[in-house]
Image (cartoon, rainbow, N blue to C red):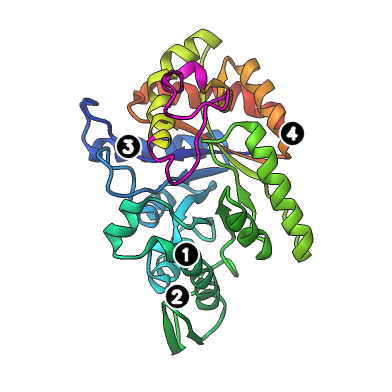
Amino acid sequence: MKFGLAYSFQNPKGSGKTHAELYKEGLRQAELADKLGFDYIVLVEHHFLDDGMNPSLLATAAAVAARTEHLRIATCCYLLSLHHPIETAENAAVVDNISNGRLTLGVAAAYRDEEFRGFGYERKDRGARTDEYLTIVNEAWTKDTFTFKGRFYSCENLAVTPKPIQKPIPMWFGASGKAGLERAASRGIPLVGSNRHHIDDLERQYADYRAFLSKYGKQVKEVPLLRNVYVAESDDKAAEESSESMMGIYGLYGKWSEWRKMTDDKGRSPQDPQFNEFKSHMEKAVLGAPKTATDQIEMYQKRLGVNHLLCWIALPGMPSDKVENSIRLLARDVIPTFK
């Protein structure tokens, strides 16, 4: 089992911090994670939000790469359809060189109307753009020159340099709908399970994805899962210290449920008042004392086959001292069980 730490660099109103301070804390924690033996730093992307959720994953990835030596840097997920494919290929290749081959480019198709309007694209084209851009970035990374004629982009005898160290850069794919699951499986790209879904939903999604893998004759070894995580000295302390920050994420996904379905642990929609209570989402999180967290991770191993757990501890508004305490407890008292 490999373990990563996820960062969105959200700065909610009233935090008392600047974004500059928040990025400084995150980079310091990346150095800590590198020393403690974590396997990944994982970066989350969205755009045009009041809390400034990180809109620039590859710039941040380059900063993490320059400050660390061992851990991999993954995007989870880079919203591929919103970015020019050649710029994506170039920027990812540069990060791969800065990191000496430590980049994993996790991508997704994007889904929020505000993001497509902000970038001047039609949301209805998200799937077609994603398909086209997946092909383009791989051509750019693996061929000295390439020619492509597509619906959204065309080029002739184009040489994209520098080439990445990894040939090609490994990818993950974030999806939950049937079209996205099939898109990932048809290309043999590992599926990243979302932190907004209950394990029952994830079981159905992974079953569909694995059926598509079989259909296309593909196999994957990596089974990554993004989860809100908080480890403290006791179960009660973990819930008390993390509840507000965790609801900063679950509540946000609830607001976006018109584009991506979101329910609580009992299947209730965001229109139900109980949806807005933290106790209604606790089964989605890895939460508690080290023994409790260990048992929960083992459940994901057994039911989903998870072998990469991406831990979102630095949740919106979470004080840095609590984030670092949870990171240390996870490294000392949980991770060794799985190594």
- The first of marks 3 and 2 along the sequence is 3
Q: Is residue 201 left or right of residue 252?
A: right
269 vs 92, nearest the viewer? 269
**Which residue is at 55% across, 73% downward?**
135
Quadrant assignment for the N terminus: top right
Q: Position of residue 293 (x, y in %)?
A: 62, 21
Instruction: Give the residues drawn in magenta, as a range.
Output: 255-280
CB contact under 8 Å: marks 2 and 1 = yes
Q: Secondary structure at mark 4?
A: helix
Q: Amino acid at mark 4?
A: Arg
Cα gap from disc 4 to disc 2, whole angstroms: 41 Å
Q: Secondary structure at mark 1?
A: helix
Q: Is residue 308 left or right of residue 53?
A: right
Q: Amino acid at mark 3?
A: Gln
Q: Residues within 10 Å of mark 4 (few under 14, many from 20)?
A: few
In this rendering, which labeled residue sits more in front, label 3 or label 4? 4
Report the disc number at residue 162. 2
- The first of marks 4 and 1 along the sequence is 1
CB contact under 8 Å: marks 4 and 1 = no
Cα gap from disc 3 to disc 2, whole angstroms: 32 Å
Q: Residues within 10 Å of mark 3 (few under 14, many from 20)?
A: many
In this rendering, which labeled residue sits more in front, label 3 or label 1? 3
Residue bearing the label numbered 1:
97
